Amino acid sequence: MGKKQKKSVELTDKKIKFNIEKRFFKVIRYYPTAMNLDVMEFDENGVKVGLINLAFAHIPKDVKKQVKPN
């Protein structure tokens, strides 16, 4: 029997933040089976835009290491 995959990993307590262009993101949770993240999006003024689902491949390399350490 193989390893059982978690449905999601809660990451709000790690307070991981990053920006892409003029938008800022705060990581909420990671879905290992789907390889995507729920992130809270903020505009350049710090105003909350909303919760979006972002592909793991689209986040910066240093953030990937924090989300999924080997």
Image (tube, grey):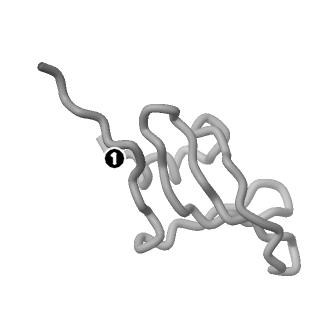
Q: Where the N terminus falls, by quadrant?
A: top left
Q: Residue at x 83, y 69 (%)?
A: 49
Q: Residue at x 87, y 80 (%)?
A: 45
Image location (x, y in percent) of residue 41: 75, 64
Whether residue 63 is situated above or below residue 5 in the rendered picture: below
Image location (x, y in percent) of residue 61: 55, 44
Whether residue 33 is situated above or below residue 7 in the rendered picture: above
Direction from residue 55 to residue 24 in the image, left or right: right
Q: Residue at x 41, y 74 (%)?
A: 13
Residue furthest to the left in view is 1
Count numbered badges in the picture.
1
Image location (x, y in percent) of residue 17: 59, 67
Direction from residue 50 to residue 3 in the image, left or right: left
Whether residue 59 is situated above or below residue 48 in the rendered picture: above
Q: Which residue is label 1 attached to? A: 69
Direction from residue 4 to residue 32 in the image, left or right: right
Q: Residue at x 44, y 63 (%)?
A: 11
Q: Amino acid at mark 1?
A: Pro
Place residue 7 in its image quadrant.
top left
Q: Where the C terminus falls, by quadrant?
A: top left
For numbered disc 1, what is the local secondary structure? loop
Whether residue 58 is situated above or below residue 2 in the rendered picture: below
Disc 1 crowd, CA 10 A, few/some/many (<14, 14-19, 20+): few
